Amino acid sequence: MPSLKDLRNRIASVKATQKITKAMQMVAAAKLRRAQEAAEAARPYSERMGAVLANITQAIGGGGDAPALMTGTGKDDVHLLVVCTAERGLCGGFNSQIARFARDHIRKLLADGKQVKIICVGKKGFDILRRDYGALIIERVDLREVKTLGFVNADAIAKKVIHLFNEGGFDICTLFYSQFKSVISQIPTAQQIVPAGAPAAGAEVKDGGSAVYEYEPEPGEILSDLIPRNISVQVFRALLENAAGEMGAKMSAMDNATRNAGDMINKLSITYNRQRQAQITKELIEIISGAEAL
Amino acid sequence: MPEAFKFELVSPERLLVSEQVESVVIPGAEGEMTVMAHHAPVMTTIKPGVVTLKTAQGKEERYVVFGGFADIVPAGCTLLAESAVAVGDIDRADLARRIQEAREDAADAKDDQTRSKAEQFLNQLTTLEGALLPA
């Protein structure tokens, strides 16, 4: 049975923890709003990019001059997985969810006899995947120093991927990230970015889509400029979704923690009060029985 | 009074401009071009340079863009810039950093084709710097 002093200390420490989790929850809520705004602001670009890409592929008509990044190498022996996770923990199952998803995927690929390479974006994913597949990780990208996620960060990752592709380092590249659905639900997602594949035919023929475009320079040249950029955009979107998801997960995790701490404080206070009362009663009995003995 | 059309300037981070304009000057990869309403459909890549737009109210705005491409249809014009800032907000250090990077790229280039591309990009950047920041 813990002493009164122990209980008092315990309650004080839980209270302190509760204050911290409460503060973290509020910080996460503020950051979530910002991350959501950023994701929102990035949407027009990727939408228009999709439309333009659809237009131009239509113009080329899947001709032979489509760049390799789009058509692929024709093989699927070597897979590159870009696993995006958060830099920090304390956000519930967020990181392990992505890592588990990626791990299942890796296991399947390895069982099929494919070769797998991994690029880890974010420290947490690296920490988890290192245990099982340390040998497969070829690179890790650290975004710890990055305060606000910019396009340049995504661009740097995309450049690495493209560079590797040009060297013949892999055939298929898949991006793993967590799709932000709502504050309480993030869905781990795998998205193939190389080869990009043609957008579904006739999916987006918007105003003037059927018009004959003039291209400056040649369509093929524009396309070969466009595809790498499109990869950057996809990575950027994934990173933004991840950032929003991380904050959402952190917010609900911290909300839970705050509530648990509250419950714990209640329970401890009851034990504390009971024990104090028991002690007072005991002392009274001692005094009374001492007086009676006289 | 020229007819106004819809112009949008979008960077990956956000939508910078979305309004009715009379004309836009775009630094196309093969030369500057002015876009007005009912322009024939053109798609072009753009080089680092200054986009000048004249709004329907007759105001003139200038933005610096670093590469990207423009999608022009009779109904409007969309400019997807890799990165864009208003001329007033241009950061001298940022520009210097970009030039430095381009210089390194040009030095690192392995074959002639990438080198000439990198050098061209570097040239465009230095021209831009000269135009924006008179020494």
Image (cartoon, grey):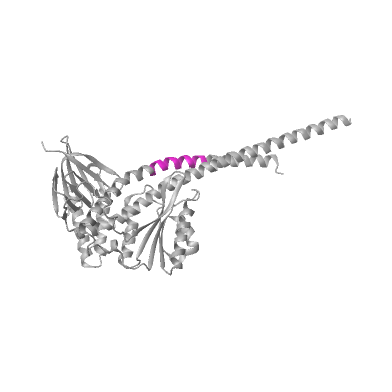
In-front residue for pair A203/B7? A203
Q: Is residue B128 left or right of residue A139?
A: left
Q: Is residue A64 above or below residue A35?
A: below
The verdict on residue B126 being magenta is: no
- The outermost residue toward the front is A202
Outermost right residue: A294
At horizontal 42% and vertical 40% (from top left) the residue drawn is A30
Asked if residue A23 lies in the magenta stretch, the reply is: yes
- Answer with the quarter of the image where residue A197 lies: bottom left
Residue at x 61% of width, y 39% of height: A265
Q: Nearer the viewer, residue A59 or B121?
A: A59
Q: State the predominant SS element of the stretch in magenta.
A: helix
- Asked whether residue A173 appears in the rendered view, the answer is yes
Q: Position of residue A173 (x, y in %)?
A: 36, 61
In depth, the one of A47 and A54 nearer the eye is: A54
In what quadrant of the picture does the C terminus of chain A appear? Answer: top right
In the rendered image, the residue lying farthest to the left is B1
Q: Which residues, given as a range, are shown in magenta?
A: A21-35
Which image quarter is the N terminus of chain A in? top right
Residue B135 appearing in the image = no
Position of residue B113 in the picture relative to residue A128 (left or right): left
